[in-house]
Image: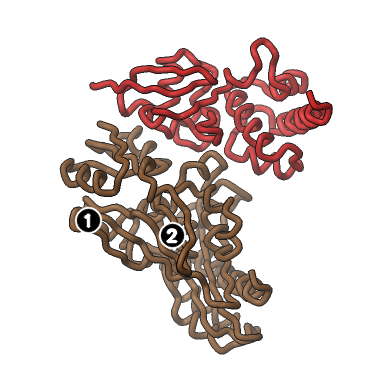
């Protein structure tokens, strides 16, 4: 295995195109353990952390641009970003210990392809986009279109995510991410739920509901969004949100959570995240 | 296997070493530089016993490829003491018997230093969350938390005296 650390996006693209079996990495919190067990045998490890664009967080022209290799702690410690997108920040902040927070990135969390990735539901609920570089240039697609199944992405072998674009939310918008784990910390989501709401007084005018860890990929729940829009989050609405969230589940059954458990908890978390998102929307969070 | 020549700063000293690209920073520190204070526990980033600071930030050295260290400033447990003068954390760990087998201790010391550097007066809850990436299978954590609290008190009284 050879290690290379390009300093430009173009150089990284050339390395990937010229070296079959090469892999890009940022924190490598999953790739290095896979290499140690022999599950992954890359010919070249392309370190993206020396490319400025991949390691920066900026705000201009009504949107945030977040380098795909930027450590999660850079995002969670960014007070302006966290104030505008608290749900995304709290999702990113749940990825591992302080040690992992200083390595793990949004790009890696997404492209690792885990259905349980904590930063992904919030990004999808916010309509975030991924800027993807490859030999043919750059293209931009919704974050929701990147992961196609567990460990699978729609990116070609010579492509990688350069940065994420997240538009500033409309006025009176709030978001929240909740996850269920069997412990208090340091675990992988059994269920994750992100909700983003825009309020017009007491009435929901726009809604995004996205679940994690209950299907092969993070899933949007249009039925829950439809139930929320036009409502004032009354008990009947929240019951409909929970029912829609549970109905959207297609989870695995394992020692960490049964199908029945994940399905029920998805509804509970969707309701609770909706209540937090609404409160943040109304309090100008 | 080809080896890369890596230049970095380790515990304040400009340092260079050779390492194969797949070598972890943990193994390079131990095998190439003889800094065996840093321990391998799990080797997968879960236990924190290999914790070091990279440009001042807490990291698991088992997850870092050695060539990534090029140009970086690395602090290991060996760099925490001031010559023969133990760091207050090391002293309070000793006095409070905040260790048993000791394998996790270097990682706890480095993580606790990073915690106190960022938050000089943490609550017990902040200490427990701040050290959540470090596993100890012996102590039950209480003595570790108390040692960090005591070190924080000592560091704060020292800084208030302007020493």
Q: Mark 2 lies on which chain?
A: A
Asked if residue B45 is positioned above or below residue A252 in the image, the reply reads above
Give whichever of A261, A193 is nearer the camera: A193
The chain whose colour is brown is A
Identified at 61% across, 87% down, the residue is A203
Q: What residue is shown at x 61% (from left), y 63% (from top)? A: A83
The percent coordinates of residue A230 (x first, y second) are 56, 89
Q: What SS does tag 1 mark?
A: loop
Whole-number angstrom distance, CA of label 1 to CA of label 2: 23 Å
| Residue A110 image offset from top left, x and y in percent | 39, 56
Q: Where is residue B76 in the image (x, y as percent from the top left)?
A: 54, 23
- Which of the colour schemes (rainbow, by chain, secondary structure, one colour) is used? by chain
Q: Quadrant of the N terminus of chain A?
A: top left
The answer to whether residue B27 is left or right of residue B162 is left
Q: Which label sits in the foreground, 1 or 2?
A: 2
- Chain assigned red: B
Give the residue pinned by disc 2: A65
Quadrant including the C terminus of chain A: bottom right
Q: Is mark 2 on a helix, strand or loop?
A: strand
| Dot 1 or dot 2, earlier in sequence | 2
Residue B122 visible at all: yes
Looking at this view, is B20 or A224 the one in front?
Answer: B20
Residue drawn at the location 64% of the way across and 41% of the way down: B130
- Judge by depth and name the residue closer to the eye, B38 or A193: B38
Image coordinates of residue A265 in percent, x first then y, are 56, 67
Residue at numbered disc 1:
A156
Residue occupying the far bottom of the picture: A230
The answer to whether residue A1 of the structure is visible from this angle is no
Mark 1 packing: few (<14 Cα in 10 Å), some, or many (20+)? few
The residue at the far front in this view is A61
Tag 1, which chain? A
Q: Residue at x 31, y 27 (%)?
A: B21
């Amino acid at each position: 295995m050879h290690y290379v650390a390009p300093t430009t996006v173009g150089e990284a693209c050339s390395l990937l195109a010229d070296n079959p079996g090469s892999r890009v990495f940022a924190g490598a919190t999953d790739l290095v353990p896979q290499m140690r067990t022999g599950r992954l045998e890359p010919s070249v490890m392309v370190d993206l952390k020396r490319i400025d664009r991949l390691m920066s967080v900026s705000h201009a022209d009504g949107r945030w641009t977040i380098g795909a290799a930027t450590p999660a702690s850079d995002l969670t410690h960014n007070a302006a970003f966290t104030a505008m997108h608290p749900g995304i920040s709290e999702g990113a902040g749940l990825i591992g210990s302080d040690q992992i927070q200083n390595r793990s990135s949004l790009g890696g969390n997404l492209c690792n392809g885990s259905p349980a990735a904590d930063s992904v539901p919030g990004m999808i609920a916010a309509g975030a986009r991924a800027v993807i570089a490859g030999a043919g240039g750059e293209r931009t697609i919704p974050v929701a279109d990147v992961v196609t199944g567990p460990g699978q992405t729609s990116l070609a072998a010579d492509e990688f995510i350069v940065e994420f674009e997240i538009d500033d939310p409309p006025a009176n918008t709030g978001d929240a991410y909740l996850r269920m784990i069997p412990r208090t910390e340091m675990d992988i989501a059994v269920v994750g739920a992100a909700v983003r709401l825009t309020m017009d007084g007491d009435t929901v005018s726009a809604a995004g509901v996205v679940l994690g860890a209950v299907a092969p990929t993070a899933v949007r729940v249009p039925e829950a969004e439809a139930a929320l829009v036009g409502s004032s989050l009354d008990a009947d609405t929240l019951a409909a949100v929970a029912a829609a969230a549970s109905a959207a589940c297609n989870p695995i059954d394992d020692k960490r959570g049964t199908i029945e458990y994940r399905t029920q908890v998805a509804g509970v978390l969707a309701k609770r995240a909706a209540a937090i998102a609404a409160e943040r929307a109304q309090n100008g969070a | 296997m080809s080896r890369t020549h890596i230049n970095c700063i380790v515990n304040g000293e400009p340092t260079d070493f050779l390492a194969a690209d797949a070598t972890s920073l943990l193994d390079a520190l131990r095998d190439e530089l003889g800094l065996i204070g840093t321990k391998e526990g799990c080797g997968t980033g879960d236990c924190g016993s290999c914790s070091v600071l990279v440009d001042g930030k807490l990291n698991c050295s088992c997850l870092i490829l050695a060539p990534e260290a090029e140009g970086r400033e690395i602090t290991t447990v060996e760099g925490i003491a001031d010559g023969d003068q133990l760091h207050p954390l090391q002293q309070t760990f000793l006095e409070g018997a905040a260790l048993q087998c000791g394998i996790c201790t270097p990682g706890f010391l480095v993580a606790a230093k990073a915690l106190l550097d960022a938050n000089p007066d943490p609550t017990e809850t902040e200490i427990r969350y701040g050290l959540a990436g470090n596993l100890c299978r012996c102590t039950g954590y209480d003595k570790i938390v108390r040692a960090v609290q005591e070190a924080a008190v000592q560091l704060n009284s020292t800084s208030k005296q302007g020493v």
